[in-house]
Image: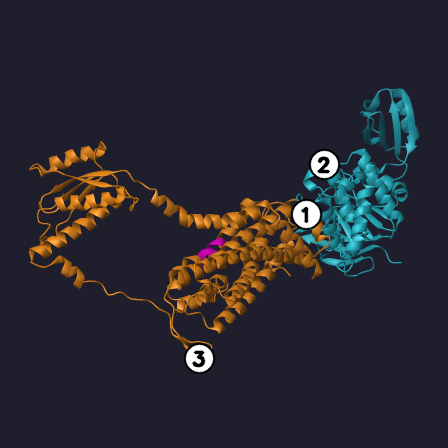
Amino acid sequence: MTDAIALRDVTKRYDAVVAVDGLSLSVPRGSIYGFIGPNGSGKTTTIRMIMNILLPDRGEIEVLGERSTLAARDRVSYLPEERGLYKKMTVGRLLLYYGELKGISRARLDRCVRDWLERTKLTEWSDKKIEALSKGMAQKVQFIAAVVSEPELLILDEPFSGLDPVNAEVLKDSVLELRKRGTTIVFSTHDMGVAEELCDRIFMIYKGRKVLDGTLDEIQARYGTDTVVVRTAAGAAALDGMDDVEAVNDRGNEQWVQLRVAPAAFLAKLVDKTEVRKFEVTRPSLQDIFLRIAKPGVEA
Amino acid sequence: MSKIFAVARAELGMIVRTKAFLVTLLLMPVFLVGSVLIPQLLAKHGDTDTKRFAVIDRSGEVAAALAAQADQRNAAIRAGTLPMAPFVPEARPASADVDGQRLALSQEVREDRLWAFVEIPADVLDPAAKAKILYYSNHPTYDDLPNWIKATVDKIVKEKRLAGNHLDPQLIEKLTQPVETQSLGLYARGPNGEIKPPVETDWKRDYIVPFGLMYILFLTIFISAPQLMNVVIQEKMTKISEVLLGSVTPFELMMGKLLGGAGASAVMGLVYVTGATFAAVKFGIGDAITPQIIVMFLVFMALAILVYGSIFVAVGAAVSDLKDAQSLITPVMLIAVLPMFAVTTVMKSPASPLSIGLSLIPPATPFVMLLRAALQPPPPLWHVLLGIVLTTGFAVGCVAAAAKIFRVGILATGKSASFGEMLRWLRAR
């Protein structure tokens, strides 16, 4: 079976700025694929090209086996980061309209709208105008608008941002349920925790180029075992001025430390400075890897 | 195509279900009828305060007759037949100190004891002297009194001059009655070969109906097109357009919006034309709004909304806020109102080279050709067809150009595009 998405040497320019530079990528069918990257790195441009909203200047894009991304459009759904809902429309009417634009029959749409409203506990809001909804409810409606057409490929841009934990969990469960049904999900996010938790594979774009692509294990293995988690009596202050430390990610009670030396050598020096309550050699988190690549002053 | 219609249906529904649309639909005729009726109503209930004025009659021939005429007029006002201010002349003897007397009377006017004062020259009866009546007042914009004085003194003086030459004023008036002209249409043959006499020229049929139809078209277009622009700006800013572009192409989205706007225009236009037809029937000129005219109205309305709607939609997509849109749209509006400036000329001579030329210049064609079609003589059919063909071509060009601007502009963020950038987008492949 072909990949859900295949990009081959895709480049997109905006005047003199190269937004995406020779990008190649394969998203396997049925996977949850995380797109990460700092703001302005080319994520949205890549997604817009996959959605056929923008055309590449060079390269090939294949979506669901179709060379013309336009041909696959009705089998693909997109939830952009900034939500777009008609405030004066009722929830039910809006969902039917968005589904209708995907070419879905009215009978199938009615069933899907009913199911999704029930699953997200919004049934009683069906006849209410969007402007009457809370932010969280509106976000759920936007999510339903993206999935109501039962797409084969679903592209979600920050689907959980601004949601309370309960509603975020409802949508996470929905995303996993969709994957079970065979939907391929591209998941663009700045929340590295969510990416680690949900994504089968992760792709990172930085300055228009691919800098990471693989499973979380593969990516972490590539970045070695130069990271330790420490908890000390002196806290993060204990690490100040230590030449062996490359970078510190202070997480309050614990610090994730990237080392320039072997962990044992570092531990020996640390116990001289303070009481060490926890010392664990670990692999760098996705957030640490992200920061190593994208923090100011670092060239990819 | 089905997606274009889906967008159009949603767009039409969103426009016609708004309170703003209903309010505009209902208030516009109220405003138009009001703008005609209210001034008439106000005129009837205008200034009815008595106006006293001093008369210095140096000829000694006019003041008494003027007072008699004023009495007659005031009696009519009191009887309720004239809803106007009574005029009360007060004769004042002429003083040797001419300027001193004028100064004193001016003071009385300033102190509101008089409204004005008037001087009748000594040689007013001598036609060779060409003497003038002098009217002094500090109410230069109130012209009822000086107009009445001018007309009344003129009549009195003419009668006196005729009598002085032993001519009977009544006989002269009778002999100098003007010859009236009756303006008629043309004779024609009826369906059974009978000769049909012409109908008399009627300003309602010949002026109000053609102008009204053109004005309705103008209103519907320039209510709907800016609404389309506002919707596009709003959807761009709220990122709704980005969601929609995940399902439809920019061209489908734009065409859907244009068709939705055209539908809203059609609803508005049909409501107004139906109202106008009822009014025309009530005034006995229902035959002036023929089915052909209504079809032509709808065709030109569809073309006009494609032309102006696509321009407004393109501008909406290219800007980031309404303020920037207004500055970009001003030149378009200036071009759009040009046909309105030519209305009088076209109505006077609908078949003149200027009228024909204007009616074949596409941005003006929908308005000017419709006006010509409703006027007598109507344009030949080939003028109408040529106008439709040219405007269709122009509309296709506008839509194609707007689609190019829309495609880029709708996803652009940051500052609004300039004319230069829009031209660059137009030239892009």
Magenta run includes residue B333: yes
Colour of chain A, in one word, is cyan
**SS class, disc 2:** loop
Crowding at dot 3, Cα within 10 Å, few <14 / some 14-19 / many 20+, comes out as few
Q: Mark 3 — residue?
A: B193
Say which chain tag 2 marks: A
Q: Where's residue B163, x and y in %?
A: 9, 55
- Coloration of the structure image: by chain
Give the label, 2 or 3, closer to the camera: 3
Where A28 sits versus B197, above or below?
above
Q: In this view, does B343 lie to the left or right of A27?
A: left
Q: Mark 2 — residue?
A: A134
Q: Closest to the observer: B405 or B28?
A: B28
Q: Mark 1 — residue?
A: B240
- What's the CA distance linking mark 3 and mark 1? 64 Å
- Visible residue check, residue B127: no
Question: Are labels 2 and 1 assigned to the same chain?
Answer: no
Q: Looking at the picture, which amino acid does disc 1 mark?
A: Ile
Q: Quadrant of the C terminus of chain B?
A: bottom right
Give the magenta range.
B332-339
Number of marks drawn = 3
Crowding at dot 2, Cα within 10 Å, few <14 / some 14-19 / many 20+, comes out as few
Q: Which chain is assigned orange?
A: B
